[in-house]
Image (spheres, rainbow, N blue to C red):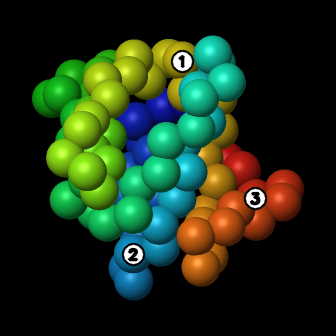
Amino acid sequence: MTIEQLRRFHQARPFMPFRVHIADGRQLDVRHPEFLAHTPAGRTIMIAADDDSFEVVDLLLVTSLEPLRNGRGQPGASD
């Protein structure tokens, strides 16, 4: 995954929540644009959850991005 691919999802207007799939099998949802941040170089991202917890992820471990609609993923919609 590249920072440009992630930015397309993050900066989409109107914003559409999306799911980040990670190589270890985890899935992290970005429900609001303010719930995602990245380092200036774009190598590391931070994803916050509704409960104020957060995950720090190496972007190289992100395998795909999936748009969410009504809290559910859309099959086959990855980048």
Question: Is 46 drawn above or below residue 41 in the view shown?
Answer: below
Q: Residue 15 carries which label?
A: 2
**Label 2 Cα neighbours within 10 Å, binned few <14 / some 14-19 / many ≥20:** few
Going by the numbered disc 1, the residue's amino acid type is Leu
Give the Cα distance between marks 2 and 1.
23 Å
Task: Please report the residue visible at 50 percent of the width from the left and 17 percent of the height from the top.
Answer: 60
Report which quarter residue 27 is drawn in. top right
x, y percent for residue 48: 27, 45
Please tell me whether mark 3 sits on a helix, a strand or a loop: loop
Residue hosting label 3: 77
Task: Please report the residue visible at 41 percent of the width from the left and 55 percent of the height from the top.
Answer: 30
**Mark 3 and mark 1 in contact (Cβ < 8 Å)?**
no
Report which quarter residue 1 is drawn in. top right
**Mark 2 and mark 3 in contact (Cβ < 8 Å)?**
no
Please tell me whether mark 2 sits on a helix, a strand or a loop: loop
Q: In this view, does 75 lie to the left or right of 54?
A: right
Give the Cα distance between marks 3 and 2.
16 Å
x, y percent for residue 79: 67, 47
